[in-house]
Amino acid sequence: MTTSPGVAVAGDLNVDVFLKVPALPKLDVSVAAHSARVGPGGVAGNTASHLVRLGVSAALIAAVGNDVLGKYLIAKLREAGIDSRYVRVVEGESTGVMVIMLLPNGEKAIVGYRGANEHLTITREEGEEVASRVDHVHASGYMALNRDDGESLLNLLSEAVKAGLTTSVDLEGIATQAKHFLPKLRGLATYVFINGAEASELCGGVNVIECIQGIIKSLKAEAAFLKLGSEGTAVITPERVEPVKQRNVVKEPVDTTGAGDAFNAAVISTLLKGGTLLEAALEGNKAGAEACTHLGGFVPPGPTTTQ
């Protein structure tokens, strides 16, 4: 059973197909998978599922196709206790699908199609309605890559700020494919999330910490959480940088898919419940590590089981 505060999570919702393979296939050569699993996924779906597991009510803003996969995802959201009223059904487009090939050494390769996710639209009026129902809005940067060039992302965040809510944005997608969009987030993100690889891509040859510090100053954000995997996190504010070491290192992760989404959810949950930035990072590290112990980034209701 979830409790307030409530969070609206906007971004991609996909069906994830996991294939455990001995090696990646070469051209014109097939590879037999050792096992296969199908489940809900996508950065927004994953984050919402973790929020619910942490006792935070979550409403998902996403899009699916009018197909069997879209109906499957909506059913799974409801089973997980996620509010699906803002999940749009896009006619004439397929539900997003990600095929994730997992190698024996823990590495993976992903082939994906965003499908209906690219067609998600949010008007100012819809953003205002969402903001009236929640305490925090979290959005994925992948929305900047949508067919509306990120207009819906800006509409949602603008209305949240206007309503006096805290907001957060994961710079995924923006850091690597839409750097020009970054200045448009000025004044719209209380907190920013980004991982080490994305930060390196975004900052180029510039010192990453100094670069991210400059970015949050220009965006007028309170803090950035730089996710560094097994090394932990750097909590970056305009005034200082605090490294937060990973205490729960997973020596042999089952699957790292969605670890960053679990981190985001734990940070948001902790901050909304009155925790400090450092406490939030510690909880985020813990959640990210735990997410690596099971297959898939979307967690169903009830105890997580290792697979």
Image: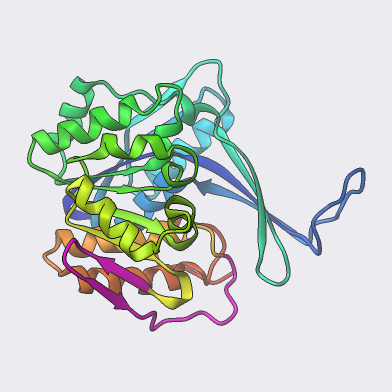
Q: Is residue 1 visible?
A: no
Image quadrant for the C terminus?
Answer: bottom right
Q: Relative to 64, is 56 on the left or the right?
A: left
Residue 303: say if magenta. Answer: no
Q: Is residue 32 left or right of residue 271?
A: right
Q: Is residue 245 magenta?
A: yes
* Residue extending furthest toward the top: 92
Is 88 positioned to the left or the right of 96 in the image?
left
Which residue sits at x=24%, y=32%? 156
Instruction: Please tell me whether residue 117 is drawn above or below residue 242 in the rendered image.
Output: above
Residue 44 placement (x, y as % from top left): 40, 45
Report x, y in % for residue 101: 70, 55
Q: Main secondary structure of the magenta part?
A: loop
* Residue 45 in the image, given as x and y percentages of width and height: 42, 46
Q: Which of 242 and 261 lies nearest the eye of the viewer?
A: 242
The image shows residue 287, relative to residue 72, as above or below, that is: below
Question: Which portion, as a residue range, is magenta?
Answer: 233-255
On the question of residue 96 being in view, the answer is yes
Residue 56 vs residue 233: left or right? Answer: left
* Residue at the image point whose x is 44% and y is 28% from the top: 146
Q: At 27% across and 63% down in the image, what residue appears?
A: 267
Q: Nearer the viewer, residue 300 or 250?
A: 250
Q: Number of marks in the image?
A: 0
Residue 255: quarter of image: bottom right
Residue 253, horizontal then vertical, whole percent: 57, 73
* The N terminus: image quadrant: bottom left
